[in-house]
Image (cartoon, rainbow, N blue to C red):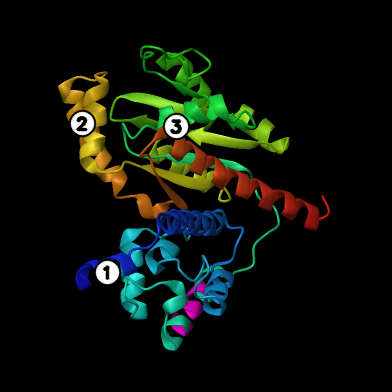
Amino acid sequence: MPDTALRSQRIRPPEVDRVAASRAAVAARRARASVKTEIAAGTRSPVEVLDTASRNPSGPEGTLRITDFLMSLKAIGATKTADILSRLEIAPVKRLGGLGKHQRARLREFLIERFEQPTTHHRTRLTVLAGPTAVGKGTVARHIRENYPDVLLSVSATTRTPRPGEVEGVDYYFVDDAEFDRMIAEHELLEWAKVHNSHRYGTPRAPIEDALEQGRSVLLEIDLQGARQVRAAMPDAVLVFLAPPSWDELVRRLIGRGTESQEEQRRRLATAKVELASQDEFDARVVNSTVADAAREVVDLMEVRARRSRRAATSSGR
């Protein structure tokens, strides 16, 4: 047998080894994803994660890329991540466990200054899901409603007409302009906005406040303007940005659903570009590659937040 064939035979791992290596790689990715979810939900301190990575560079914290770590932090997106890495003189390909002594010290100082501030024990269980038009917010929200009954999905009011398949009181409360004006005047809406220079949408306040008072986890599926209003009214709410896999896919989804005229499509795509630029305002980012995976990731964030709320309530004696 030729030498090259012998060498090839010697270095090629057995099939069982390849399967084991593949399973180990999947487990490692899931462990890192879990760390990112905990950071985004606030159940793990960024400094603690960094310290764990330093002690165990081969663990899930240590093998987490610095870019993924920073983008898991509250209100830090791709643009801010690049700026932070430039200031701290850290290459974006670095992993937390592979940082040099001085890089680690600079990063730790940044994290302490920005995130290690005293916080109150009280935490709401309100999660806001927002994102650009046609990204699939409604589809993901419906999947959560149908498959995760413990999550209360808020039903918004809107002045637009129902789309095919939408049900009154389930997908939206469909109201006319006069009724919407009355709800605004009576302060019955937690937030409201005019979307795409067209119809108005708003979140009825009473069902949200009642559910939160009962300790339930509530999900709001709203637009960017509404998310900003909720952040101002309830600073403890977690804002999750639902992003498309790519711009081309977003365009395909909008055109493919065939519910808007060409003029309306152009207007919505122009708005979507502005909405995509707002990702840094959000606490977490979920890519809607598949509805089931995106829904599961949103619910994971909510469950981690709920556990934190229960622990906070216990520690405060309530």
Report crowding for label 3: few under 14, some 14 to 19, many 20 or more residues within 10 A (C-alpha).
Answer: many
Instruction: Identify the residue at horizontal 61%, vertical 58% (top origin).
Output: 43
Q: What residue is shown at x 56% (from left), y 28% (from top)?
A: 147
* Residue 32 horizontal/vertical position (percent): 49, 59
Q: Quadrant of residue 94?
A: bottom left
**Position above or below: 56 against 160:** below
Which span of residues is magenta-colored? 105-111
Q: Which mark is residue 246?
A: none
Q: Residue at x 27, y 18 (%)?
A: 259
Residue at horizontal 51 percent and vertical 39 percent from the top: 296
Identified by mark 2, the residue type is Arg
Q: Which residue is mark 3?
A: 140
Question: Which amino acid type corresponds to the residue marked 3 in the rendered image?
Answer: Val
Q: Around disc 2, counting alpha carbons within 10 Å, would you say few (fewer than 14), some (14 to 19), or many (20 or more)?
A: few
Which residue is disc 2 drawn over? 267
Quadrant containing the N terminus is: bottom left
Horizontal side of 93 relative to 284 (left or right) equals left
Q: Mark 2–mark 1 contact, CB under 8 Å?
A: no
Determine if the magenta segment contains residue 308.
no
- The residue pinned by badge 1 equals 6
Mark 2 vs mark 3, CA separation in Å: 23 Å
CB atoms of marks 3 and 1 within 8 Å = no
Q: Which residue is at the front of the view, 268 or 99?
A: 99
